[in-house]
Each structure stands twice: as C-alpha cells, then as structure tokens.
Image (cartoon, rainbow, N blue to C red):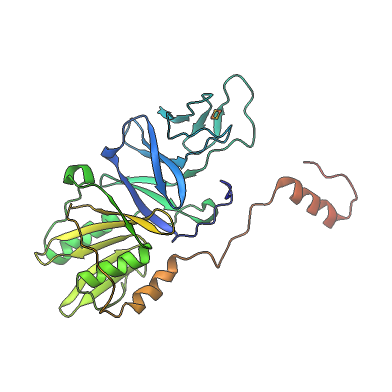
Amino acid sequence: MVGPQLHRPPFPVGWFAVAGVDELPGGALVPLAVFGQDLAVGRTPDGRALVTHSVCPHLGADLAAGGRIDDDEVVCPLHEWSFSHGGACTSAADGPIPKTARLRVWPTEVVGGTVWAFNGRDGEPPTSPPPVLDDAVDAVADTGVETRYRTTAEAGYRPEIRPGHPEDVLAGILAYIGAIDGAPCVDNPGTWVGTGPDGPRARVRGPGTVVVRRPDGVDEVVHVTPVDGFSVMVRTVTGTQLPDVEPTGADLSAFRAWYRRFDHSMTPGPLPARSGRAARRRASAAGAGETPAG
Ligand code: FES
C-alpha cells in the first residue's frame, strides 16, 4: 500500500481536471476516484476546491462519507479531528495533536469553473499553473472564435468513463480530428500541436487536456483524467460527446515520444530522510560515539 508521504504515481505527472466546481456541494466532501486512489473533493464557501486522500489518518474513516469543510478546515465525520487545507492536523478532539497525523492533500486550483488537481511524485508541488487559460487566449488569437468555458453541469453533459490510458485516448482524439502529424509548440515545449493537411487542428496541453478545432471552427476543450490503470474520465467542456476512436491511420509516434515528458518515474528525487536516521548518520560521520537525539 502506498503511504501518503511516499506517493509514486504510475500515472502521468501533471495537472488533470477532476470535477466541475458547481458539481460539488458546498461544505461537503464527496468521493473522487482518480490517479488510482480513493480521494475526496469538496468546495469551500469562497469557491475554492480541495482534493484530499479519503482515508482519515486517525483511524481510517472515509472522509468522503460525511466529511465536511468548515471554514478553512477538513473535519472527519467519525471523531471530528480537523485538518488544515495543507493537511496538518489542527484538532484531535480532546487529546493532544499527534505529530505524525497528517492528511495528504493534492495541489488544487479552480480555473474556468473546472477543478484541477496536480498528480505529482512524492507530493511534489507543480511548477506551473493549470493550462486552460492559455488555451483561451490561443483560441481567440488563432480563430477569432472565443472559446466559452462551461462546466459540465452548464453543458448538461456528464463526464464519462472510458477504457484506456490517457495517452491512448488523446492519440485517438488526435486521429479523430485529422491530425496526422505534429510537433511540440516552439514557444512552449509542454504543448503538442497536432496538424492536419491544412494546418493546426489540436493543441495538447499537459498530460490530460486537448483543445481540438472542430470543422465549424469552434474550439472544444477535452479533459482526459486517469481513473486507474484501465480507464479514464473524459470531459468535453463545451458539451459535445466525442465518438470512440482508435488511433489508427495517423503517425502519432512523435506525439507518443513527446508524451514521455510526463513520466517522472525514472528520475526519482531524494526521499525524505527520517529524523532519527539522519541523526544517526550525522553522529556516525562525526565519530562521536554519542547516542543521537531523536
Ligand atoms: S477516524 Fe477520523 S477522526 Fe477518527
């Protein structure tokens, strides 16, 4: 079992859309199954969102089954322990606050009515914000057609679960809209521009978002978020349902090679050292022979 402090995701690292903000009941945590984990998501009274591990670090109650967001804290339904939005335990009912009681929280942003969560390695923070606002600018500049971002609730469209990995599903979408080739964006290598015979047809932003140019000139934002190793959650923000497409007939090998940039599993960072272990190492290096503290 993966502990909350040593999270090594077998999924692409980056920002993913996980919910529409107005799908969430204010003040309550609800279940969210993404990144191969059972999470909880909720909306704060001031319109921000919060994504957390759903298992309470006290005795394992499900925070998505009755947990609530009170002001700036998450409250467990079982024994009413409280946690800050950063995950620190702020109240342990009648007892002292244990130093190790910490709730894992995911970096979360609300942009354009969409709740984004950052899937990072070992809880690493994001180095850039979610990508959608840049796409709005691109859409206006390229076509003169303003992309109107709507939540799935506004569009009357429910997110759907589809089989596959985000890379395969994105490749299928590129093939569907006629992108036969492509290249990283010159100004932003984190964006892939898929081109057809008549020019750009899609921009893949990060590991799970693509803006496609429909034949009528309207740009469609599609979010693809890993649920587990076998399925993804697909959201079309402007409300059009895309058909199932097999990524055949197009040479998207360069796209697949570009997508490797979201695999951070081969370059692990240093693991956090336990204080006792670090202290013993320091004492050993110093050759003091003293009993290390901690
Ligand atoms: S299980 Fe959450 S406070 Fe006890």
Along the line of sight, the residue nearer the viewer: 272 or 12: 12
Along the line of sight, the residue nearer the viewer: 77 or 160: 160
Q: Where is residue 122 drawn, in percent x and y?
A: 55, 53
Taking 69 as reference, is 191 left or right? Answer: left
Q: Can I make out residue 18 in this image? A: yes
**Residue farthest right in this picture:** 289
Q: Where is residue 152 drawn, in percent x and y?
A: 22, 46
Check the picture and name the quadrant holding the C terminus. Answer: top right
Along the line of sight, the residue nearer the viewer: 126 or 215: 215
**Residue farthest top in this picture:** 94
Residue 147: which quarter of the image?
bottom left
For ligand 1, which image quadrant applies?
top right
Along the line of sight, the residue nearer the viewer: 110 or 75: 75
Position of residue 278 relative to residue 103, above or below, is: below
Position of residue 193 relative to residue 242, above or below, is: below
Q: Where is residue 3 drawn, in percent x and y?
A: 58, 47
Q: Where is residue 249 drawn, in percent x and y?
A: 25, 79
Taking 220 as reference, is 20 left or right? Answer: right
Number of marks in the rendered image: 0
Position of residue 41 relative to residue 218, above or below, is: above
**Identity of the residue drawn at 52% across and 51% down:** 123
**Identity of the residue drawn at 40% across and 53% down:** 227
**Identity of the residue drawn at 63% across and 22% down:** 95
Residue 213: which quarter of the image?
bottom left
**Identity of the residue drawn at 14% across and 65% down:** 214
Q: Can I make out residue 129 in this image? A: no
